[in-house]
Image: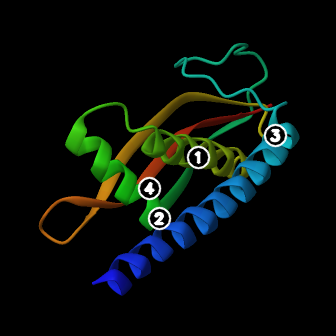
Amino acid sequence: MMYDIGFFVLLLVIGYISGTIVEKRHYTSIREREKELQSLPTIALKKPLNEEGITATRLVNGNVVISIDFFKKFLAGLINFFGGNISSYETLVDRARREAILRLKEDAKGADEIINLRIETSSITKNTNSNVGAVEVLAFGTAIYR
């Protein structure tokens, strides 16, 4: 019995450490790519900022699926049991949303702006007990070329 508890705690520690490392690396990558692509305006307006000189438009999209690590799932289960804000899922959704927008911008190479930005989020569940296994985010919009 004591070995089972020790093994479970060891798995939690390994999950926490590896999940933290992966999340930090992903955030570092996101910040670097956001700096590179910050000059491409991405807005939710349905019309471009300047309608003059438009030569082409194209639908662009970015999609990402990010899975939930074991520690976050365990922590979320505890918080869900006692009630409260599940901040471990907030970082997951934030990373997914930002990554999807970056992929959208990368899909719009050479565009002058992206309009009508829309973001769809869904959870991918495991088994029939509706445990969240991953989060999918789809960002799409219209690239404007001048």
Q: Which mark is residue 17?
A: none
Q: Residue furthest front?
A: 2
Q: Are marks 2 and 4 in contact (CB under 8 Å)?
A: yes
In the figure, is residue 59 to the left or right of 57?
A: left
Q: Which mark is residue 69?
A: 2
**What is the C-alpha distance between the residues marked 4 and 1?**
14 Å
- The answer to whether residue 60 is seen in the rendering is no
The residue drawn where x is 23% and y is 38% is 82
Percent coordinates x, y for residue 38 in the rendering = 81, 32
Q: Are marks 4 and 1 in contact (CB under 8 Å)?
A: no
Name the N-terminal-most of marks 4 and 1.
4
- The answer to whether residue 50 is seen in the rendering is yes
Question: Mark 3 belongs to which amino acid?
Answer: Leu
Q: Which residue is mark 4?
A: 72
- Give the total number of marks visible in the rendering: 4
Q: Is residue 7 above or below residue 78?
A: below
In the figure, is residue 86 to the left or right of 95?
A: left
Q: Helix, strand or loop at disc 3? A: helix
Tell me the mark number nearer the camera, choosing from 3 and 1.
1
The residue drawn where x is 31% and y is 31% is 84
Q: Is residue 5 above or below residue 37?
A: below
Disc 4 crowd, CA 10 A, few/some/many (<14, 14-19, 20+)? many
Q: Report the colour scheme.
A: rainbow
The residue drawn where x is 47% and y is 48% is 138
Name the N-terminal-most of marks 3 and 2.
3
Q: Which mark is residue 95?
A: 1
Split into 4 quadrants, where in the image is the N terminus?
bottom left
Q: Helix, strand or loop at disc 2? A: loop
Question: Mark 1 belongs to which amino acid?
Answer: Arg
